[in-house]
Image (cartoon, rainbow, N blue to C red):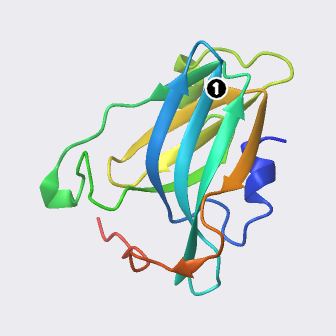
Amino acid sequence: MNIADLEATLPWGLHDARLESIEVDWLNARATLTVRVRVTAGQDIDRRGRITVGGLVFCSIDAPEIDPSRHYEPVPADGLWIGSGQGAANDEAKSRLPLVPDGCFIHWLFVQNWNRFIHICGRNADLTWLEPQPARARQARPPKRTD
C-alpha cells in the first residue's frame, strides 16, 4: 500500500488535512506523519492519525515562502494546511528529485501555508488512527485563497 492507496480509503484523502508533525528515522528507513484528516462531506469532522512510510528512500522538504501579507507563515498554530498527490508535484520538482527506485512510490504534499512542497519516497505506507472516534474539527474549513 502507498499513500495514494491510503487516501482512497478516506472521504477527502489528505485534501485540507493538517500536518502536525513529520519524524524521519534514517536508521530504520521510516517517516512518520501525524495528520488531522477531514472525514465528512462538510469537512466539519476530523480524526487524528499517523501515516507511517516504510522503506523510506527520501523526504524532501522545500524551504517555506514567508510572506505574512499573503498568509504564508512558517509555523501556524494549528498545523500545516496540506493537499497531496501521487508522483512529483510538477516538472521543476521532477527535474531535481532523484529517480524513484523500483518497488517504491513518490507522493507530494502541498503546504498551503508555505506555498511549497514536501516529497516522500518509500516502499509502503500505513495509517493508524490516534483517536478512537472522529470529532468536531478544531479548525474550520480553510478559507479559499484569493491571491
- Quadrant (top left, top right, bottom left, bottom right) of the N terminus: top right
Query: Residue furthest toward the bottom?
Result: 42
**Residue for point 57% across, 19% down:** 97
Q: Look at label 1 and name its amino acid.
A: Arg
Q: How many marks?
A: 1
- Picture quadrant where residue 77 is located: bottom left
User: Taking the image as drawn, is residue 54 in sight?
Assistant: yes
x then y, percent, for residue 43: 55, 80
Please rate how many residues cluster around mark 1, counting C-alpha atoms within 10 Å: few if below 14, some from 14 to 19, many from 20. many
The residue at which mark 1 appears reads as 30
x then y, percent, for residue 30: 64, 26
x then y, percent, for residue 105: 76, 31
> Which residue is more in the foreground, 101 or 91?
101
Left or right: 52 in relation to 78: right
> Which residue is more in the foreground, 126 or 108?
126
Left or right: 118 in relation to 27: left
- Picture quadrant where residue 147 is located: bottom left
Which secondary structure lies at badge 1?
strand
Is 132 above or below relative to 106? below
**Residue for point 25% across, 45% down:** 74
Left or right: 71 in relation to 100: left
- Picture quadrant where residue 53 is located: top right
x then y, percent, for residue 114: 32, 47
Is 134 above or below relative to 64? below
User: Taking the image as drawn, is residue 90 in sight?
Assistant: no
Query: Residue furthest toward the left?
Result: 69
Left or right: 46 in relation to 142: right
> Which residue is more in the foreground, 18 or 115?
18
Is 90 above or below relative to 84? above
